[in-house]
């Protein structure tokens, strides 16, 4: 059966081109890969190679022809043993491109199916047993140690995590208990060890990768987004990447712009990641254990200033706090205040100050940024009709912007005032003490904003 | 002022890297040679068909063909052992076929159909098979290298007697993360062979315009990683070098670098007019160094006759024809697939399971 040679598309956007020159004549023997013609488009001249062995039986589009549509038959190749007489047996060769073949698509449906609602796994655990006062630092360490005892596939890797006992002492004691095979000091090589972690997760281990701070994770963001977050999707579900990237995030004290930034909205932007930012030690422990057990990549945002603060933590090895569930840390009726990480403490302090002025604020600790527990926020706003969001990060395209939009979409009719944001200022973090204080959202900012929301818009 | 590559660059310090060409001492059995021939021919015919389908508009986006480089992955694979892992970047169709992945599934992924390895969601550059130990198929130049080191880390961590073969191009060798990877692999003596497929051009930039130093095989010198320069157009030379490198890694000596001197006949991607090199250069490589022609001649010397060779041709052609038909008839993914595989679903049971 003679082989049809068609006008090729040389790029995804090419629809037609000029057949500039034939480099073979009828009767020539060609091998697959031989250049047989040149084609010009508005972008380039390209060579056309034979795709099969044979003898050129007939040229159907002459050299110099312009506007030759892609997929037009331009020549016919005879296979071994065929002669020109066989050409007669071919169906009349169309000079125009054939209609595109109908693909066997599924029955037509809506163009874009609705996005599924992310199910929230596991109910909030309640605890009535004994509890111990632990710092956030100790709670994080206990979470890692317990998960390493539970599963030998879990290992911890990062700069100064082993012999130095952690730059912020979060991994203190882990080397002694688990040895150098599972608690691994790396060179200063963020992109390298983040990528190594992703490969190890593909190799069915459970890496916990510590960034000394999330500022340095910028060196590794390609591996986090392109390799860790997207591969499950790009592999049609084959290649899960169970990995935790953890470390301090947000503003530290007097370290200036390159060491003081909240990255919550950066990671929360990307499908394929979970993003967690706990406040209390109990949540830090329960959420880190959940993150290590999660079959997906989890960004676990800690806060340096919080490491030394103490909270009651349940005395239970299986203390797991489910990812994706916010927590109402103070009930109220007049205004909802959302916060995460260190800002929860400031929101609670603001709620105290507001109470003194007769305003009852409900404070929600988001705990997880992605998937965001929108249901809890919306339910609260339907009760209070007012919303103030708090974060240390920059205002533009921040978490507050997203929460505001979700509330507009889901509870617009319940709002008595515009959603208001309390954020870090829209500047790189300054070093000078007075400027740094101005750049960061303070308790008074939350109080002022909440008051304006309540008083300015009495419904 | 134009900057020219230093003409003295060939005279670097120290000894030049060892080179590996085909030796007759390690001639594999004829059956193995036939199998390597078939594997290379399958890649060649598959890629030619992929190029054709691209020309017909049935394959979209980027499509990087492996034609000319077949000996590299087939030689490596012939020296590997079960359980060894493979990772590469986006010129990856040949690696998948050499790993034993089904041509139907690879071709159907190229056409973006539900029957593809990634169910149509990855395309040419992003395919994987845990079963065949192929870990991608990565689209960012150089990003596969630390991932390969991570796979090697997992082999060592689990005390598996395996090696990760991490492929990268002559373009990728200038990415910083490659050296971060060399350092960690050498520091922790991880079982990884870095296979640098030096096909002479990173897109349109000749390697001499992009890479300082004498040889890419030397790039691990500072980390104490041994390197060999290999005739990557000769599958037996590749196999010989691969056996040495894999044994080195398997014996716990840490990583090894193989620089494969190879050549791609086609453009960087389908839309590359390849004006940075002459037709004569391409033709000379094709006529004098073609890996498939070389092995065919060797097979003839080993009394494999034309009839047998034609059988292999026909067999390979049938595989590609079947793959093409499958890739054209497999349905597009169901619209509901848009939202699947973003996250692995998590249940209370898996969260609370005992390990």
Image (cartoon, coloured by chain):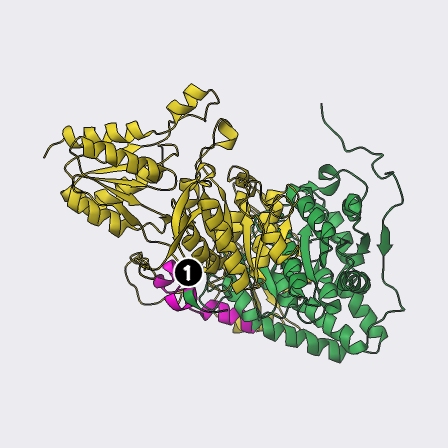
Give coordinates of residue B281: x percent, y percent. 75, 48
Give coordinates of residue A11: x percent, y percent. 52, 49
The segment highlighted magenta reads B322-351
Q: Is residue B323 on the magenta stretch? A: yes
Given residues B52 and B206, the one toward you in this image is B206
Tell me what residue is drawn at x 49 percent, y 66 percent. Answer: B116
Chain drawn green in the picture: B
Residue matched to label 1 = A316
Q: Give the total number of marks visible in the rendering.
A: 1
Q: Is residue B224 above or below residue B209?
A: below
Q: Is residue A294 visible?
A: yes
Given residues A250 and B134, the one toward you in this image is A250
Q: Is residue B80 above or below residue A314?
A: below
Look at chain A in the picture and name its colour. yellow
Give coordinates of residue B303: x percent, y percent. 84, 78
Q: Where's the N terminus of chain A, which quadrant?
A: bottom right
């Amino acid at each position: 059966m003679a082989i049809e040679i068609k006008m090729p598309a040389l790029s995804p956007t090419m629809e037609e081109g000029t057949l500039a020159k034939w480099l073979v004549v009828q009767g020539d023997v060609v091998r697959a890969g031989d250049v047989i013609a040149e084609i010009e488009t508005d972008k380039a001249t390209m060579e056309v190679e034979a795709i099969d062995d044979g003898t050129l039986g007939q040229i159907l589009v002459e050299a110099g022809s312009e506007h030759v549509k892609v997929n037009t038959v331009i020549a016919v190749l005879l296979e071994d043993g065929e002669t020109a007489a066989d050409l007669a047996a071919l169906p009349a060769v169309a000079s125009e491109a054939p209609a595109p073949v109908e693909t066997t698509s599924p029955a037509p449906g809506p163009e874009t199916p609705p996005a599924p609602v992310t199910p929230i796994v596991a109910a909030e655990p309640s605890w009535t047993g004994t509890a111990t006062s632990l710092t956030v630092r100790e709670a994080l360490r206990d979470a890692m140690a317990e998960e390493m005892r539970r599963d030998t596939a879990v290992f911890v890797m990062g700069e100064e995590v082993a012999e130095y006992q952690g730059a912020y002492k979060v991994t203190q004691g882990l080397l002694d208990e688990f040895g150098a095979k599972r608690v691994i000091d790396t060179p200063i090589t963020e992109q390298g060890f983040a990528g190594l972690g992703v490969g190890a997760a593909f190799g069915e281990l459970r890496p916990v990768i510590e960034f000394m701070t999330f500022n340095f994770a910028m060196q590794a963001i390609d591996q986090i987004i392109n390799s860790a977050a997207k591969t499950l999707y790009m592999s049609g579900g084959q290649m899960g990447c169970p990995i935790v990237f953890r470390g301090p995030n947000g503003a530290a004290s007097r370290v200036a712009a390159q060491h003081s930034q909240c990255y919550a909205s950066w990671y929360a932007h990307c499908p394929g990641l979970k993003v967690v930012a706990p406040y209390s030690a109990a949540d830090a422990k329960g959420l880190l254990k959940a993150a290590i057990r999660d079959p997906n990549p989890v960004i676990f945002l800690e806060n340096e200033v919080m490491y030394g603060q103490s909270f009651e933590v349940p005395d239970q090895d299986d203390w797991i706090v489910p990812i994706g569930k916010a927590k109402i840390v103070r009930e109220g009726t007049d205004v909802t205040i959302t916060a995460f990480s260190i800002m929860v403490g400031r929101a609670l302090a603001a709620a105290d100050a507001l109470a003194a002025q007769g305003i009852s604020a409900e404070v929600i600790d988001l705990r997880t940024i992605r998937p965001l527990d929108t249901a809890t926020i919306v339910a609260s706003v339907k009760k209070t009709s007012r919303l103030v969001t708090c974060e240390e990060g920059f205002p533009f395209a921040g978490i507050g912007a997203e929460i505001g939009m979700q509330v507009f979409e889901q509870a617009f009719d319940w709002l008595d005032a515009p959603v208001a944001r309390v954020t870090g200022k829209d500047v790189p973090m300054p070093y000078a003490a007075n400027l740094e204080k101005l750049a960061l959202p303070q308790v008074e900012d939350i109080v002022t904003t909440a008051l304006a929301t309540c008083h300015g818009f009495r419904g | 002022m134009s900057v020219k590559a230093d003409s003295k660059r060939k005279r670097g310090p120290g000894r030049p890297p060892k080179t590996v060409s085909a030796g007759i001492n390690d001639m594999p059995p004829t059956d193995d040679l036939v199998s390597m021939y078939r594997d290379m021919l399958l890649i060649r015919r598959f890629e030619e068909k992929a190029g054709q389908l691209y020309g017909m508009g049935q394959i979209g986006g980027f499509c990087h063909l492996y034609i000319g480089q077949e000996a590299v992955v087939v030689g490596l694979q012939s020296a590997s052992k079960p359980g060894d892992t493979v990772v590469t970047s986006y010129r990856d169709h040949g690696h998948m076929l050499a790993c034993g992945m089904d041509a139907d599934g690879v071709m159907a992924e190229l056409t973006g159909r539900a029957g593809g390895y990634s169910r149509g969601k990855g395309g040419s550059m992003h395919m994987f098979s845990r079963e065949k130990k192929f870990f991608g198929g990565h689209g960012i130049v150089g990003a596969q290298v630390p991932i390969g080191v991570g796979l090697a880390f997992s082999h060592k961590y689990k005390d598996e007697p395996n090696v990760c073969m991490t492929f990268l191009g002559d373009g990728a060798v200038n990415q910083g993360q490659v050296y971060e990877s060399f350092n960690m692999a050498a520091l922790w003596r991880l079982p990884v062979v870095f296979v640098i497929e030096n096909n002479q051009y990173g897109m349109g930039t000749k390697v001499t315009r992009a890479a300082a130093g004498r040889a890419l095989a030397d790039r691990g010198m500072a980390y104490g990683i041994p390197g060999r320069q290999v005739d990557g157009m000769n599958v037996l030379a590749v196999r010989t070098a691969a056996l040495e490198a894999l044994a080195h890694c398997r014996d716990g000596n840490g990583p090894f670098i193989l620089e494969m001197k190879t050549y791609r006949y086609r453009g960087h991607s389908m839309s590359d007019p390849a004006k940075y090199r002459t037709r004569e250069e391409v033709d000379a490589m094709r006529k004098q160094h073609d890996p498939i022609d070389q092995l065919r001649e060797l097979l003839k010397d080993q009394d494999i006759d034309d009839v047998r060779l034609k059988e292999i041709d026909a067999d390979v052609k049938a595989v590609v024809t079947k793959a093409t038909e499958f890739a054209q008839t497999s349905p597009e993914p169901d619209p509901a697939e848009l939202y699947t595989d973003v996250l692995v679903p998590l249940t209370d049971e898996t969260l609370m399971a005992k390990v």
